[in-house]
Each structure stands twice: as C-alpha cells, then as structure tokens.
Image (spheres, grey):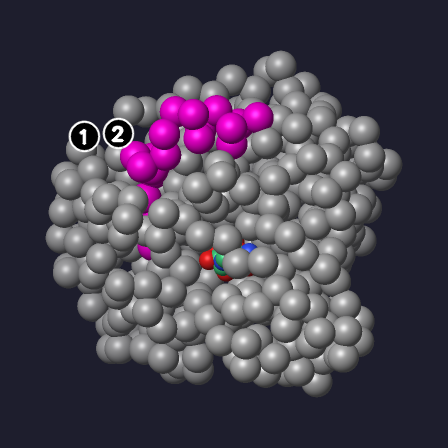
Amino acid sequence: MNILVLGGGGREHAIAWALAKSPRCDELFVAPGNAGTDRLAKNVPGLNPEDGQTVLGFVRDHAVGLVVVGPEAPLVAGVADVLREAGVPVFGPDAQGAQLEGSKTFSKQFMERNGIPTARYRSFSELEPALAYVRELGAPVVVKADGLAAGKGVVVADELEDAEVAVRSCFEGAFGASGSTVVIEECLTGPECSLLAFVSDGKARCMATAQDHKRAFDGDRGPNTGGMGAYSPVPIVTSDELAAMHAIMERAAKATAREFEHDYRGVLYGGFMLTPAGPQIIEFNARFGDPETQVVLPRLESDLAEVMLAVAQGRPADVDLRWSEQWAVCVVLASEGYPGSYEKGKVILGVDEAEAVEGVTVFHAGTALNRDGELVTAGGRVLNVVALGDSFEEAREKAYEACDLINFEGKQHRLDIGKRAIAGREEQGA
Ligand code: AMP
Ligand code: GLY
C-alpha cells in the first residue's frame, strides 16, 4: 500500500518513521516533509496539504491507499471530506469533527451536552458582556480565542487586569478571525496529562499517556510554545485517574458517532488537567500532539499502518495496541528567539553522532538541506531528540547526552524535561 502523510514537522517525521517500519507500507510520501522525512520517504514539497482537490489528484496519480493527516489546518479546511467523498481511506476526521479543535465554543458545547467534565465557561462576541463575565468569575481566569491560533490564543490571567487586556486584544484582532469570539473560563489547577485515542465508529482505543512542556524556559517560565519536550508514560497519574480518563475518551468517542454527520476517524487528543475533583478536559484536539507523538509512537509495538488503515476504514475492533514497557523522553532543540522571531539557515552538526547513542532517534521538525546539501535550520522547533530507556532516568540521560552532541548557532533547549515525572504532585499544582 502506498501512503501519503500530510505535514512537515517532528510529529510527521515520527509518524512516517513508524509507518516506514510496516511491511504493509510500499511507497511512502510526505507533503511537504522536511530533511528528516527525506531520508525515509519521498518528500512532495510542492503539494499544499490544505488543498483537497490537489491532494486528491496526487493520490490518484500515485495509487495512494491511505492518507494520514498530521496537522489541524487541513482537517479544519475539509481535506479529509474531499478524500473520503472520493472513496480514499483517510486517517483524520472531516471538517465537522475537526471543529472539536477548530472552535473552542463548539468543543465546549459538545462537552456540556455529553457530560464531559471541563472548566465552567461562556462564549462572547461582544466586549462589554465578556468583561462583565471576567469580573464575575474573578482572577485567576482563562481567556481563549475561539479559533485556531497555533497554541498562542490562550491567556491564563492571575490578575483581573491581565484578563481584561487579553479580552480586549482578542476583540481588537490579535488573533484575526480566530479571536472574534472569545471563550472565558474558570481556571483549573493540577498537573496536565495528554491522553490520545484512536477513534473510529464511535469507539476509542486509548494510547499511552504523555506530558508536554509548553513553556519556553526551565521551571515552566516564559511564553507558551508549541511544546519544548515530552515524556511517556506519566507516572503521577493514579490508576483511578487513568480509568476516569479512559472513560471520558470513550464517552467522547461515542458522542462523535451519535452527533456527527460522518464517522470521526482519526486521533482524538484529550488534554487533561488532573484536578482535585478528578480529571477534566482542558481541550480536545483532532490530531496527534506535537511533541507527544514523538514519545508515544516509539513505544508502540503494533503495526501503525495496520492501525491507521483500520481506523480509516471504520474497523475499530482491528485496532490492536501493544506498548513497550520502556520509557521515552523527547527534548526539543529550538532556534534562538523561538517562539518569537528567529533566524533560519544555521548549519546543523552532530545528528549522526547523536543517533549513535543507544536508544536515540532524532526526529526533524524544522530542517532543510541548503544548496550545498548541508543540513540547516528552517523553523522555530528544529529537532526532537528522543531516547528510550529501561527507566525514566536512563531515557532522560541518553536524550541529554545526544542533545549535547548536536550543534547549531543559537541552539536553545530546556534542561528540565521530565523533571516533573519524578517530582511530587505538589510541584505540579495539585
Ligand atoms: P490550550 O491551548 O487550550 O491547551 O491551552 C494552553 C494551556 O493553557 C493549557 O495547556 C493549560 O496549561 C492552560 N489552560 C487552558 N485552559 C485552562 C484552564 N481552564 N485552567 C487552567 N489552565 C488552563
Ligand atoms: N503538544 C500540544 C499540542 O500538540 O497541541
């Protein structure tokens, strides 16, 4: 079977890497891909992943039997709808299902209707009532742009004043059309944990737990980013909490079958907060997490191509998930200045040496080859250094040993990835 993966970040490299191991996988294409996917697949840099008709044309020309959509934008744009309509097996929900990520109001209403625990909230399209609700809830309070904002549309305000500034800036267009509706919600406390599930035909098959590190700097300081590192599994989750999280994902999957016009077929990402009152959903995403995927997929022992095809064809009973007992730690190497502005084109050295460390795989996020064929930086998040180990400490040590072998001008990374795995819950706000 020929497979096409849409996207070009570290998540897509990890997906392509796992698919390439499958005996079911013949030709593998990644559009647009990056310098890492180039080594195990055919990159298609000219193909716009958000243009359904063009993607369909490529699929027909290259006899593609499965399309895997990595990022949210093509899902929200309805690329899966176009392909499914044409009879192509697609891993990723249609535009309606993707609204669980594309509109926070849609998502909150879905949770409310289906008894899924989440923060109290209201949505507003006008300034004054929004400000009044902020004052009613009091600080701390959370302000979110309704639409997609690349992880930047959320402000957790400790002071009322900051919340008011955030509401105003949303309505003034800081996030474009994404901010014309604003969601204001109560602030929850507790450690965060991601639980992703393969969803098909109303059934959820949950993956292993993972924890992201969203802030740019050590000690969870600095601006929010796309994610600076992750680890899996998350040992602080109790068995009762895990059971509650599984039940929530199953309930959500069942609701997709009941409510949506077409079957939701792809990943449902549950971003949980483990509050004193039990796990609650902070957000749903309609795709794999980045960088959670980079620690979850290396622990998957099942054939990912089989799993994804079963999901895409509505056969959840055939989704057989087996997990390695090993621990995985991922450290993101970023460009200086990320998540703000940064320079590109810095020569990267040492990736092969890093991969020679036992248990280490380097997934590329923002990389390219320059005219001289040298590996250079091409994005904010540049490389994802992933290590597997028999203990959490071993995985973490190997990941950092490998990070030290890689060099490029302005290399920036957190030194405390996974520290929370071994810290007590008190340190995580529980
Ligand atoms: P989101 O983009 O919705 O995942 O939000 C980004 C981050 O903001 C989350 O990972 C949380 O750390 C934080 N956050 C979002 N909503 C809340 C909430 N209701 N209470 C506390 N923190 C939140
Ligand atoms: N790592 C968070 C996300 O993918 O949304």
Residue at 44% over, 29% down: 242
Task: Give whichever of 399, 50 is nearer the camera.
Answer: 399
Secondary element under disc 2, as helix, strand or loop, is loop
Give the left or right position of residue 171, taking residue 305 as reference. right
Secondary element under disc 1, as helix, strand or loop, is loop
> Looking at the rendered structure, which numbered label has been put on residue 390?
1
> Looking at the rendered structure, which numbered label has been put on residue 326?
2
Task: Verify CB contact (< 8 Å) between mark 2 and mark 1.
Answer: yes
Residue at 26% over, 72% down: 411
Task: Give whichever of 419, 56 is nearer the camera.
Answer: 419
Magenta segment boundaries in residue numbering:
229-247
> Looking at the rendered structure, which numbered label has been put on residue 96?
none
Pointer 2 or 1: first along the chain: 2
Residue 245 visible to the viewer: yes
Query: Does the magenta portion include 244?
Result: yes
Residue at 24% over, 44% down: 424
